[in-house]
Image: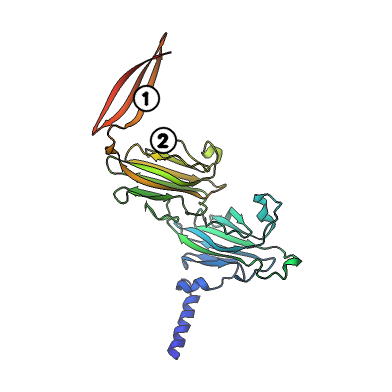
Amino acid sequence: MWSLLGLFLLLLAAAATPGGGGLTHSVSRRCNDTISSMYESEGVVTSPGFPSRYDPHTSCSFTFVGASHQRVRVLFTEFNLKEPPEHLRPHERCLHTDWVALYNMINGSRKQEIDHFCGTSVPNSVMSASSGLQLVFKSGPRRPMEQDLPNSRMGFSARFKFVSDLGLESGRQVSDGKCHFVFNSSEARNGTIYSPNPEGFYPLDTTCVYIFHGLPGEIVRIIFKYFDVEGVLPCNSESDSDYLEFSNFPSADRKIPTFCGYMAPNVIHSDSSYFRMTFRSNSKFGGTGFAADYQFLDNSRHPFAIKRVIGAAFVNGDHQNQANLFLAVTVTSLLIIKNLQLDVLV
């Protein structure tokens, strides 16, 4: 009997000890708590009293502190707060009711707002822009008609996790914490690529680089099946947009436009076995990102395919235009360049 009691006491001690295994996940947390990845890699936070309804005039916060190469991912599993007034505009509704807000912690102290959430719709998951994140919950007064409503405003529950791979499982990450992934044809000829924090809001102030390396004679094809990147034309920093860009070189490739908004790019093909895709988000607004399937293709099966128009020059005559059009054509393993003289009547 005493041995069973001793085992029980040991389990209780493990639950109370930082990093003491999965038992810490079920322990009710106090408000205004700081959670460090040194002691817990993941767990659960809830509104006070959850799953019972929370009290009016409640203020509660949780501050997450990760290592320098980590980010914080918050996934809401239950969400039931007081509904906001319907007459307000969408961006104002959550400011006049009970709400949950998430903030990036900049340099450990300065806060950058990510978003406010309210009502009963479960929010998408959120990821921090760096190693620090704060979740704040506030409730206002309770109206007299709400006093006797059973199970009203029961609150929220959310899972948190400190991650170093930004939630991305495909590709080979260059180093922990860096949003830089390499896709080698020799390792996987096809797969799916995502923006950071798949199926949730991508983090602010983030740059992700995806590099594709095919075998000799291969190209890569990318087909988008989902696209939500906040921004407006011309989809660059000058228009305060998040955007996605493509390049056949390690540097920029001006012949391929950048993309943003909700209109997914058409099917993208590389010119050769090397290809680079870059995603950039700013500090203002966010979206739910993108998902795309990639596949390495053997381009040697199409030996007569025209690869690209290298250049064109037009010379004006009295009644004719003369053009020198250079086409690079791959025939088996030989590159043949033929100068075509085209006489065009005006």
Point out residue 223 in the picture as x, y percentages from the top left corner: 41, 44
Dot 2: few (<14), some (14–19), or many (≥20) neighbours within 10 Å? some
Q: Which of these two is toward me, 305 or 249?
A: 305
Tag 2 secondary structure: loop
* Screen quadrant of the N terminus: bottom left
Residue at position x 76%, y 67% in the image: 144
Residue 92 screen position, x and y as percent: 67, 51
Please give left or right for residue 309 compared with residue 75 in the image: left
Considering the image in quadrants, where does the C terminus appear?
Answer: top left
Q: Mark 1 packing: few (<14 Cα in 10 Å), some, or many (20+)?
A: few
Q: CA distance from mark 1 to mark 2?
A: 16 Å
Q: Any mark on residue 311, and which? A: 1
- Disc tally is 2
Task: Give the x, y percent position of residue 28.
Answer: 56, 72
- Which residue type carries mark 1? Gly
In the image, what residue occupies the spot 47% across and 61% down?
162
Q: Most extreme residue toward the left, as rendered?
A: 333
Q: Position of residue 52 (x, y in %)?
A: 62, 71
What is the image's colouring?
Answer: rainbow
Residue at 46% in and 58% down: 70
Residue hosting label 2: 253
Indicate the quadrant where residue 61 lies. bottom right
Left or right side of 201 for 301? left
Residue 211, quarter of picture: top left
Q: Nearer the viewer, mark 1 or mark 2?
A: 1
